[in-house]
Image: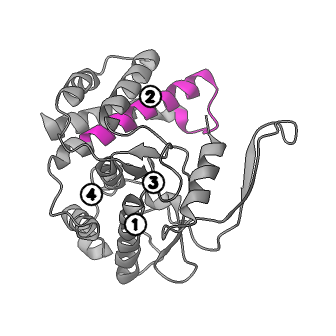
Amino acid sequence: AHQVDREFRVISALAASDVPVARTRVLCNDDSVIGQMFYIMDAVEGRILIDPSMPEQSAAERSAIFDSMNDVLARLHKVDPVNVGLSDYGRTGQYIARQVARWSKQYAELKTEDIPAMDRLAEYLPANIPDEDLTTIVHGDYRLGNLIVHPSEPRVVAVLDWELSTLGHPLCDVAYNCLGYHLTEPPHGFARADLAALGLPREEDYVAAYCRRVGRERIGNWNYYVAFSLYRLAAIAQGVYVRGLQGNSSNPESIKMSRAPRERAELAWSLVS
């Protein structure tokens, strides 16, 4: 369910930080007004560029937009939750363990076929969680399509779609943001793209830029974080597919996602096996 009250809260709180968000106006929790809770925020002028190849942009503009996306994510992870009133926005520590348990349970409840890679990951991931147990504000679905880019300049002016945000492990946010380097299906995947020709950074350079911005040398266990993100995405895809089968999905394309859970799980397992 789209928890608009949480989304309103985090956007309102981040207005006091250097993370670009739309200005919030009011939260209405009276269901009698329009039939459900809602909030109002300002419209932010700009572009939503879903396709990472950004065909209408130059190579230099693509490079700058990716760098801005990287910069904003680093800024988010440097925000102190206490300073912006979000100390109780989620639990501190053990984010990966809780997420694996959550998505494993959801996948098991919605399973439509045997996917051995999902079963292997369900055992491997909780048994091999990296020791570095960090907690920051995380977006949960940080990708190009959830950003508003300035109308004419190659920079991010607002981050949208905070429904999965919480207090969590920042390196999971970074890995999720980098899934396009591993996925091939449009519009988000660009694993087969000619990055140099497009002006896009290599994954290792993108991750290195993030590390410089947050003051760390490197990210150890990188493949683990990517595999975790793919496992989570596979479980989400399974839910979308089942809702499509049941006729409960708002996305008419959901019924076509039958292969996505297997493909993402097998890709994840190949990274850690």
Tell which circle, 1 or 3, labels the residue nearer the N-terminal end.
Answer: 1
Give me the C-alpha separation between circle 2 and circle 3: 32 Å
Give the residue number, with chain letter if any, for mark 1.
Answer: 75
Element at label 2? helix
Which residue occupies 50% across, 42% down?
Answer: 88
Mark 3: few/some/many CA within 10 Å (<14, 14-19, 20+) = many
Label pair 4/2, CB-CB below 8 angstroms: no
Q: Which residue type carries mark 1? A: Arg
Give me the C-alpha separation between circle 3 and circle 4: 38 Å
Give me the C-alpha separation between circle 4 and circle 2: 24 Å
Give the residue number, with chain letter if any, for mark 3.
Answer: 81
Tell which circle, 2 or 3, labels the residue nearer the N-terminal end.
Answer: 3
Which residue occupies 55% across, 39% down?
Answer: 253
Foreground label between 3 and 4: 3
Range of the magenta residues?
227-254
Give the residue number, with chain letter if any, for mark 2.
Answer: 238
Tell which circle, 4 or 2, labels the residue nearer the N-terminal end.
Answer: 4
Tell which circle, 3 or 4, labels the residue nearer the N-terminal end.
Answer: 3
Q: Which residue type carries mark 3? A: Pro
User: At which x and y percent is residue 263?
Assistant: 31, 35
